[in-house]
Image (spheres, coloured by chain):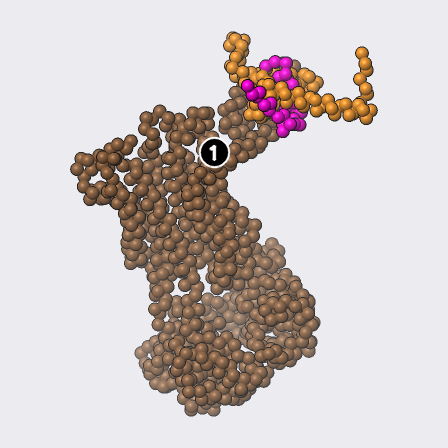
Chain colours: A orange, B brown
């Protein structure tokens, strides 16, 4: 059996901050659009504000690149608004988010080595 | 929902329209949901909606362009793949549109350069041409004297300044051969008024126009480039002119010259006649044209009113010079209008014609595209079933059609660039602004604009007439999709439209052809065969007395006539079809009083002894000039039939006397000759008065009639001039056949251009008809099979198919005739002896179009007749 070749993440890096935050928002589970928006605002303390206009341009792009997908399963209609659509990370999207996070990590490590950032205190 | 909520919802809906329809379909409801949640949250926190609106609006404005761009990239990639798959269709569309767009771009480059661009002078819209008129001065008016110019200058409230101009010839000596230089004699500030700065040297100064100043001149750009190769070292050189040396002080830039193409310019003090005592002191010594610049903020109406005040004052102060009955007045015309007056009607007709050719091309391509859409219905159905909505498909088809049109536009620009030289030469015949014709950014933007419009036009017709639900095709059991009835009607309508527009073009070309043919048939009243003309403008310094001038021509003509191949030779001032300006003047007729409102007038013509023989002008009555009509003999004249009819209708003019100088001397009429078209073949004959050269000694040309080919004696004519005087220039040598041909050049070129456009339109339309009929036959194969199986003969089938095709053509013809009856009036100014609704042309063009259309229907009809009914019945 031939192993399926993993898709290259390199062509998609670096991600824009907004795209990365959308992937991060989906990293801990599926969400609908408004929830993604709220999650990003909360995590960044309001520094990254997505709007209806910008969010769905990003969702369309991530969907086209197969980093996210729409879920077919939906909650109980009585608890839900039919206009909502739920999205989750694909495996490839998780790989891309991971690659982007590692890229940030490398940069931070260089900043620490250059004493731009203080070293982490050992527990 | 509250009122504010409803308004907010409406506004959000308008904003969403900025996004592509497909995006709205995919995410629109979600976006609305998110926005409402954000608004609700903000309101519940008491924060107001401003921030939410701001983020939403900016987000949509940022997202929309990138989404549209993404879709455009997708559509473009798809369109290019489709174009590669159908090379035949792609090349046919690009070629058809390329020709149409190329023709339009070429003609527009001329319109832009000549009619639309501002004059290449400083504030060109402020420049005027002034004219003076009297009752018998004709449409072009008469010149100004120095005293009159001073009066206008002093008294005008609306003119900032005015300058003068007249043209004459000088002889340039000291080169390999003497040259006649066409010279503009101008005020010192002539070029300052126009805002024209020299490219080398300097402009004239006030000191250059002082009496006794050094003689100076400026070169025109064309003369500088042709004679001196653009060498700036020519500034400062001394030119050995016929009267005295002149220093070259400057070179002009390449600006349009009006009213004449001159080689050099000099200040008024350079012209002996203009700087004479008579010119300075006599109010009626008129020889100058006048240009003026208005004061800022002044319009033409105010200038006209100002001129009226001045002329009223002049009539009051100088009653002798301006009698009440003369109808003396002055007028002003914008220089831009003067420079383009002759060009305007022809160029606008050509632009309209080119526009029609492009319209036909678009209609033809729309039909081609309709056929292609029919063949692609399965593909469109699948795409629709996979989620592409109608507007998406429409957008994709428009992208494809616009790309094809842009490719056609590129080809059109290349074709226009290739034909630019020819166009400039064509435009030169109509306007001095021809040198400004170029393919600049405006012309390229025009080409781009009409390319995009063409793409939208020919792309939208098939797209908008498509099925509401393309996916419906998938349910049809037949593998071959049938065109909807609506599409069939559209195709027929497109053919009808093509035929009607083609008819318009063919009528235009047909009328011009008939007009041109009639022009060619015009009897000019003289025989141009075997006659050569040459310009011999005598050096006015050397030949400053009538006797010297007579002696030169006596020797020159004597030597010419000694050549056995010379039948006759004569000198003259101008000759037929070569009249640069009219020599129209009032005359007195002995024993008759002219009515105050209409004095006696005649056009002056000068010719030596053999003038009428050399030109083959027939003697109708009396006698021609003979050896006795010399300088000391009684003054004689010969008149033409037109002058005889006008003033001596009921009596014999032979022996009657007229005066050209207000009664100081009297001239006896000795003969009547046939009428000659002196000015142009399409102009009326003028009332002409011929006087012998020996009695007036005004001449600048010679005419030589030969026994054989007149071009064979060109060298002999030159050599003979130089045998008499080696420093006498001789130029502009051409045969009268060439002169006659030259006079027909403009209408010939216009006819050829219209003919080419019409032929192009006819070919495109014929292929369109043929294509529609071929498709119709292939779609009706089953039906034709059934008919033949039920007993229809080949003749029946042929008549059915031809009838269908010719029915469309006849419908197009009827529309075309109605349109032509109305539109051809616009070209009546270009026609000669032909009515815009000439029945013969209409009938002829209709017959030609029907014949071509029948030929286009013939092949598909033959194919229909050849259908095997058994095979046809199996076709679904």
Where residue A104 appears, as percent x and y from the top left, is 71, 23
Residue B101 in the magenta stretch? The answer is no
Q: Which residue occupies 29% across, 50% down?
A: B855
Q: Which residue occupies 49% across, 80% down?
A: B715
Q: Which residue occupies 45% across, 89% down?
A: B562
- Foreground of the two, B677 or B83: B83
Where residue B166 appears, as percent x and y from the top left, is 56, 71
Magenta stretch?
Answer: A1-30
Q: Which residue occupies 29% across, 58% down?
A: B840
- Foreground of the two, B873 or B858: B873
In this figure, which residue is indicated by the disc labeled 1? Answer: B395
Tell me: B295 left or right of B743.
right
- On the question of residue B290 being in view, the answer is yes
- Foreground of the two, B204 or A60: A60
Count the marks: how many? Answer: 1
Where residue B193 appears, as percent x and y from the top left, is 62, 63
Tell me: B679 left or right of B304.
left
């Amino acid at each position: 059996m031939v192993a399926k070749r993993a898709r290259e993440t390199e062509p998609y890096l670096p991600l824009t901050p907004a795209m990365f935050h959308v992937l991060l928002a989906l990293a801990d589970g599926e969400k609908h659009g408004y929830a993604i928006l709220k999650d990003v605002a909360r995590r960044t303390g309001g520094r990254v504000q997505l709007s209806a206009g910008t969010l769905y341009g990003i969702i369309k792009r991530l969907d086209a690149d197969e980093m996210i997908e729409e879920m077919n399963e939906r909650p109980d209609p009585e608890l839900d608004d039919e206009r909502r659509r739920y999205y989750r990370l694909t495996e490839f999207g998780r790989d891309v988010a991971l690659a982007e996070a590692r890229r940030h990590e490398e940069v931070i490590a260089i900043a620490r080595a250059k004493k731009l950032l203080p070293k982490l205190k050992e527990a | 929902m509250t009122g504010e909520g409803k308004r907010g919802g409406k506004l959000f809906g308008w904003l969403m329209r900025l996004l592509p329809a497909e995006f709205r379909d995919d995410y629109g409801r979600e976006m609305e949901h998110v926005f409402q949640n954000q608004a609700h949250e903000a309101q519940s926190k008491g924060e107001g909606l401003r921030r939410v609106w701001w983020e939403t609006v900016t987000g949509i404005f940022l997202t929309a362009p990138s989404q549209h761009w993404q879709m455009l990239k997708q559509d473009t990639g798809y369109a290019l793949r489709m174009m590669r798959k159908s090379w035949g269709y792609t090349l046919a569309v690009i070629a058809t549109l390329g020709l149409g767009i190329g023709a339009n771009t070429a003609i527009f480059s001329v319109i832009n350069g000549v009619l639309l661009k501002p004059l290449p002078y400083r504030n060109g819209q402020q420049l005027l041409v002034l004219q003076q008129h009297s009752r018998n001065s004709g449409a072009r008016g008469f010149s100004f004297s120095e005293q009159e110019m001073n009066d206008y200058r002093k008294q005008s409230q609306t003119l900032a300044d005015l300058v003068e101009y007249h043209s004459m010839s000088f002889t340039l000596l000291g080169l390999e051969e003497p040259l006649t230089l066409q010279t503009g004699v101008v005020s010192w500030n002539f070029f300052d008024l126009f805002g024209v700065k020299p490219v080398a040297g300097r402009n004239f100064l006030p000191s250059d126009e002082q009496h006794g100043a050094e003689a100076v001149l400026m070169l025109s750009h064309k003369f500088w480039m042709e004679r001196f190769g653009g060498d700036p070292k020519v500034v400062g050189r001394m030119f050995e002119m016929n009267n005295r040396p002149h220093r070259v002080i400057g070179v002009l830039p390449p600006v349009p010259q009006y009213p004449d193409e001159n080689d050099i310019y000099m200040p008024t003090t350079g012209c002996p006649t203009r700087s004479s005592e008579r010119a300075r002191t006599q109010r009626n010594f008129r020889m100058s044209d006048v240009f003026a610049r208005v004061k800022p903020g002044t319009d033409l109406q105010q200038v006209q009113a100002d001129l009226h005040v001045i002329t009223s004052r002049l009539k009051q102060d100088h009653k002798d010079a301006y009698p009440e009955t003369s109808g003396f007045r002055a007028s002003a015309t914008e220089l831009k209008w003067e420079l383009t007056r002759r060009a305007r009607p022809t160029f606008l007709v050509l632009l309209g014609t080119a526009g029609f050719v492009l319209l036909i091309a678009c209609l033809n391509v729309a039909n081609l595209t309709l056929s292609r859409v029919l063949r692609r219905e399965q593909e469109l159905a699948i795409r629709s079933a996979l989620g592409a909505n109608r507007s998406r498909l429409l957008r994709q088809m428009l992208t494809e059609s616009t790309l094809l049109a842009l490719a056609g536009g590129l080809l059109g620009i290349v074709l226009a660039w290739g034909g630019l030289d020819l166009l400039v030469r064509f435009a030169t015949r109509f306007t001095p602004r021809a040198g400004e014709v170029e393919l600049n950014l405006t012309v390229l933007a025009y080409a781009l604009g009409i390319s995009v419009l063409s793409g939208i036009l020919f792309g939208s017709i098939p797209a908008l007439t498509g099925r509401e639900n393309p996916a419906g095709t998938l349910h049809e059991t037949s593998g071959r999709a049938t065109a909807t009835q609506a599409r069939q009607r559209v195709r027929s309508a497109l053919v009808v439209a093509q035929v009607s527009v083609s008819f318009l073009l063919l009528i235009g070309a047909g009328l011009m052809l008939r007009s041109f043919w009639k022009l060619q048939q015009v009897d000019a009243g003289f025989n141009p065969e075997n006659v050569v003309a040459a310009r011999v403008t005598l050096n006015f310094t050397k030949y400053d007395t009538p006797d010297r001038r007579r002696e030169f021509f006596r020797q020159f003509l004597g030597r010419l006539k000694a050549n056995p191949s010379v039948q006759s030779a004569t000198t003259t001032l101008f000759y037929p079809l070569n009249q640069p300006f009219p020599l129209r003047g009032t005359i007195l007729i002995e024993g008759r009083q002219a009515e105050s409102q209409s004095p006696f007038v005649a056009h002056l013509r000068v010719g030596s002894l053999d003038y009428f023989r050399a030109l083959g002008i027939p003697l109708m009555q009396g006698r021609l000039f003979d050896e006795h009509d010399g300088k000391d003999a009684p003054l004689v004249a010969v008149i033409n039939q037109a002058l005889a009819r006008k003033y001596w209708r009921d009596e014999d003019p032979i022996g009657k006397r007229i005066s050209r100088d207000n009664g100081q001397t009297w001239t006896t009429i000795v003969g009547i000759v046939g009428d000659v078209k002196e000015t142009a073949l399409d102009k009326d004959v003028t009332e002409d008065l011929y006087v012998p050269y020996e009695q007036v000694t005004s001449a600048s040309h010679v005419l030589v009639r030969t026994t054989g080919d007149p071009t064979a004696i060109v060298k002999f004519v030159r050599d003979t001039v130089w045998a008499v005087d080696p420093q006498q220039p001789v130029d502009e040598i051409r045969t009268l056949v060439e002169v006659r041909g030259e006079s027909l050049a403009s209408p010939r070129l216009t006819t050829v251009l219209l003919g080419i456009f019409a032929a192009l339109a006819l070919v495109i339309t014929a292929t369109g008809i043929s294509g529609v009929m071929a498709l119709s036959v292939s779609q009706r194969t089953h039906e034709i099979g059934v008919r033949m199986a039920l007993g229809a003969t080949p003749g029946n089938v042929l008549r059915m198919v031809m009838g269908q095709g010719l029915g469309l053509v006849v419908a197009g013809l009827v529309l075309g005739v109605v349109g032509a009856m109305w539109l051809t009036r616009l070209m009546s100014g270009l026609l000669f002896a032909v009515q815009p609704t000439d029945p013969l042309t209409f009938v002829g063009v209709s017959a030609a179009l029907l014949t071509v259309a029948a030929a286009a229907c013939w092949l598909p009809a033959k194919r229909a007749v050849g259908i095997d009914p058994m095979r046809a019945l199996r076709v679904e």
